[in-house]
Each structure stands twice: as C-alpha cells, then as structure tokens.
Amino acid sequence: MKAKIGQIITFKADYKISLKNGGNALVKKGDKAQVLKKIDETTGEILYLTGAASGKSQYIRLEVDENIDLDDITKKLIEELKK
C-alpha cells in the first residue's frame, strides 16, 4: 500500500499491537490512523485516531509518498477548530 503524509487510513482486519509501556492494544477493523512521516522506503509512522490504540504512534510497513494529502489535513484542521 502507498499512502501520502497526512492521509487517513482505515484498517481492514483486527490485530494486536504491542505498546511501549507494556501490554497490547487491539486495533479493530474500521479503526483509523493518520500517516505522519516517511521513515525509509518501506516504513512509515502512523498515529492511531480511533479505537483502543487511539493516540498511540507506530512504525509500520508502508510505502509513504512524500507528497502531502492536503484534503485529509484540511478536514482534520476544520474538525479541530469546530471543537
């Protein structure tokens, strides 16, 4: 999968992630995350936005296009301003 920085991705299956401070969190089908940055050619950093992992970041196997997804970033900014 290839994603742009700022793009919101939706997970298509359930899986567990290990947390830095110990324990696990369940990422469920339909949970969302935002692509934060490109680490290398096959790795990107994401921030979980929903579910048990909300607020946690993780490096995952993901090809990240260095272009910015302005639509998703704009939507997120507008949502935050409405709060």
Image: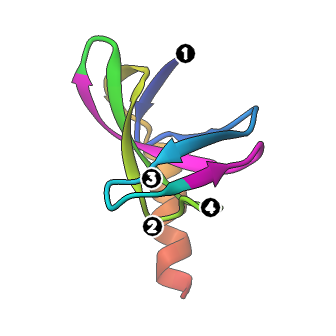
Q: Which residue is mark 1?
A: 1
Give the farthest residue toward the front: 22
Tell me the element at label 3. Answer: helix
* 2 and 3 marks in contact (CB < 8 Å): yes
In the rendered structure, which amino acid carries the disc numbered 1?
Met
Q: Outermost residue, top direction?
A: 41
**Label 4: which residue?**
50
Q: CA distance from mark 4 to mark 3?
A: 16 Å
Which mark, by number, is residue 49? none
For the magenta stretch, what is the residue range? 25-39
Give the main secondary structure, helix, strand or loop, of the magenta stretch.
strand
What amino acid type should be assigned to the residue bearing mark 3?
A: Ile
- Label 1 sits on a secondary structure element that is loop
Residue at mark 3 to residue at mark 1: CA–CA distance: 19 Å
Q: Residues within 10 Å of mark 4 (few under 14, many from 20)?
A: some
Query: Looking at the picture, how far across and down is residue 82, in whole percent?
Result: 55, 84
Per the image, the residue denoted by label 2 is: 77
Give the Cα distance between marks 1 and 4: 20 Å
User: Could you tell whether 11 is left or right of 20 in the image?
Assistant: right
The residue located at (38%, 58%) in the rendering is 22
Name which of mark 1 and mark 2 comes first in the sequence. 1
Nearest to the eye among marks 4 and 3: give it. 4
At label 2, the amino acid type is Leu
Residue 73's disc is 3
